[in-house]
Image (spheres, rainbow, N blue to C red):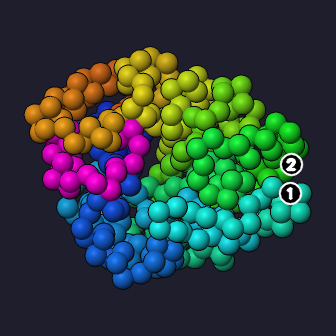
Amino acid sequence: MNDTFLRACRGEKTEYTPVWFMRQAGRYLPEYQSVRGKVTFLELCHNPELCTEVTLQPIDIFGFDAAILFSDILIPMEAMNLHLEFSEGKGPVFRDPVRSRKAVDDLIVPDPDETMPFVMETIRLLRKELKVPLIGFSGAPFTLATYLVEGGSSKVFLETKKMMFQKPQLFDAMMSKITDCTSLYLQAQARAGAQALQIFDSWAGILAPVDFKRFALPYVQSIINDLRKVTDVPIIYFANNGATLLDLSKTSGADVLGLDWRVNIKDAIDRVGNHAVQGNLDPIALFLPKEELEERIKKLLDDAQGARGHIFNLGHGIVPQTPPDQAKIAVDAVHRFSGK
């Protein structure tokens, strides 16, 4: 087992900088498209054998130092008694948004082993195949809540913020249920064999720091506190567009803080102190000419040398239009410049 990624998460010395990409198993790969063309997205997420296949694809092709479970952050919300659809061009859709006391009361906190056994089976299958660590994941409660309240994706998050500001008790009741669900879900992933866990707060950056501290961070802290009682796997917290939230994010309890590309990694390292960091190449930088891409990666690695531990990643998910050859150039450059 190549455990370089896990050692970097723990702040231990590594021979080189490990690398993986968010959404590394996905639409930019022809091999993924071949599988996806046979089933709907939700059918794929519910099929352990196919999820295993697409999770392994980028490991075999590019030599990443960690695999991330193929699934979707909204799978547990489906298990909370909500009808989830994925619409071409629109993304995830909840036809009945959660905006009333009755809608919150109707949410259930599911047993993850009973309601999402396909996720745990995927983890078990992957552990038999992988020679690099497996990362399990969930959405953070605030990010999940935005989808429930808005009914899908949003640009201004009007309904979510209206509930926060006008009905804070209702918002807290919903968040408490989402938090309980997420905590149990991640604990089940660790039991099934996930060797690290990432919490994606994709929409944390829409919040002012005062609102992040009140409406988002405590729920992440609660989940991580629960996890600490039952597992010692490294925990990564990624608050997207969260450069203004770093001083708060470092109190989450996570071992590793994920960084988007909007902050210089050296500056972030100076701010987060005794934390490993993950990041933070702009995903669109993968479209640079080879020499310029390599130069940017080398600069990023140099800037990250003062970190307690560094995992190279993109500042968000790889975009579907990315040429796979460019991903290969990046992975090879990280390994070469960091000493593998």
Q: Disc number at residue 170?
A: 2
User: Which residue appears at 36% of the width and 75% of the height?
Assistant: 36
At mark 2, the secondary structure is: helix
**Closest to the observer, 85 or 90:** 90
Residue type beneath disc 2: Leu
Question: How far across and down, in percent of the image, does residue 316 sit?
Answer: 41, 43
Quarter of the rendering occupied by the N terminus: bottom left
Whether residue 137 sits left or right of residue 282 in the image: it is right
| Pointer 1 local density, CA inside 10 Å: few below 14, some 14–19, many at least 20 | some
* Range of residues picked out in magenta: 313-340
Callout 2 touching callout 1 (CB < 8 Å): yes
Question: How far across and down, in percent of the image, does residue 286 sit?
Answer: 24, 42
* Residue 305 in view (yes/no): no
Residue 334 lies within the magenta run: yes
**Closest to the observer, 229 or 328:** 328
| Pointer 2 local density, CA inside 10 Å: few below 14, some 14–19, many at least 20 | some
Residue 196 lies within the magenta run: no
Q: Which residue is mark 1?
A: 100
Q: In terms of image quadrants, where is residue 14? A: top left
